[in-house]
Image (spheres, rainbow, N blue to C red):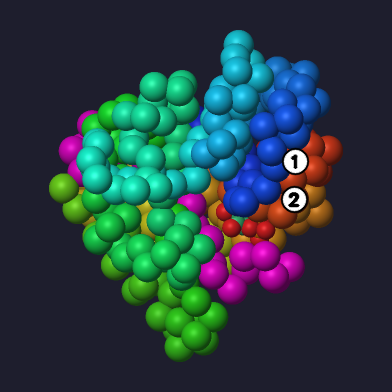
Amino acid sequence: MNRRYRKTIIAGNWKMNKTPAETKEFIAQLKPHAARAKWCETVLCVPYIDLPAAVKAAKNTRVFIAAQNMHHAESGAYTGEVSGPMLCSLGVKYVVIGHSERRQYFGETDEIVAQKVKAALSCGLRPIVCVGESMAQREKNLTLDHVRMQIKTIFFGVDPKDVKKIVVAYEPIWAIGTGKTATAEQADEVGRAIRECIREIYGARHARSVTILYGGSMNPQNAGELLAMPDVDGGLIGGASLDWEKFVDVMESANQ
Ligand code: 13P
């Protein structure tokens, strides 16, 4: 973390879990802890149907609400989809884009992800855009090349003034939901490469303002070590974010 230049963000990605009633209860428990956690911004990425309950429960708190996906068009004949302006109208502030599960199960490519990032920015949402390598790519020593290519594609055409609004989440696919965590050094190495890539395109001032999260089996036990690294500015937490006490423990780990 480097709080001088950028925000620390602890985000919970609930994936396809929790009902509106469970959402309300979770945020009621989280609220007093989030109020004290001045060292980080707290974000909850909830299913579409939970968004209204989440925004309502999080009103006047330091908890921000994110959607887990959006369509790149503003409106139109896209049955089953939800657009950025629709999310904004609910009071949603962030949107996860290009999660590896969206890429794996729903065919999202870097080009689609790049389109969605621009659509999110244009309606005032902050994208949390996910990148990361497979185990096969890591074993072939292709991690940094792969992630750099993803970053270049995603940032292509982004206006410099919008760069700091983008949050990048480095999520190695092999670490998601597996209990295998990247070491702090691995997470930091990729975080540094991401920042370096942004620096090459936009310069040092922009690059140091971007918050880079780590995601992949992050939990209260390993969060402290990961967050102590200079290019790990927070976490995108799946499994451990479903339990408010564990999530609060991760937030506390960011307080160093
Ligand atoms: P887990 O923390 O369950 O590994 O999930 C990480 C993730 O995919 C967050 O977006």
Residue 15 seen in the current view: yes
Q: Would residue 173 appear left or right of 107 to someone viewing this image?
A: right
- Secondary element under disc 1, as helix, strand or loop, is helix
| Quadrant placement of the N terminus | top right
Q: Residue at x 61, y 27 (%)?
A: 54
Image coordinates for residue 243, horizontal then vertical, percent: 79, 43
Is 215 in front, or is 160?
Answer: 215
- Secondary element under disc 2, as helix, strand or loop, is helix
Q: Quadrant holding ligand 1?
A: bottom right
Q: Residue at x 67, y 32 (%)?
A: 20
Residue 204 seen in the current view: no
Residue at mark 1 to residue at mark 2: CA–CA distance = 6 Å
The residue beneath circle 1 is 247
Is 102 in front, or is 124?
Answer: 102
Q: Do residues under tags 1 and 2 come within 8 Å of each other at their CB atoms?
A: yes
> Cβ(mark 2) to ligand 1 < 8 Å?
yes
Amino acid type assigned to the residue bearing label 2 in the image? Ala
Image coordinates for residue 143, horizontal then vertical, percent: 44, 75
Is 138 in front, or is 238?
Answer: 238
Label 2 crowd bin: few (<14), some (14–19), many (20+), radius 10 Å: many
Amino acid type assigned to the residue bearing label 1 in the image? Phe
The residue beneath circle 2 is 240
Label 1 crowd bin: few (<14), some (14–19), many (20+), radius 10 Å: many
Span colored in magenta: 158-181
- The quadrant where residue 217 appears: bottom right
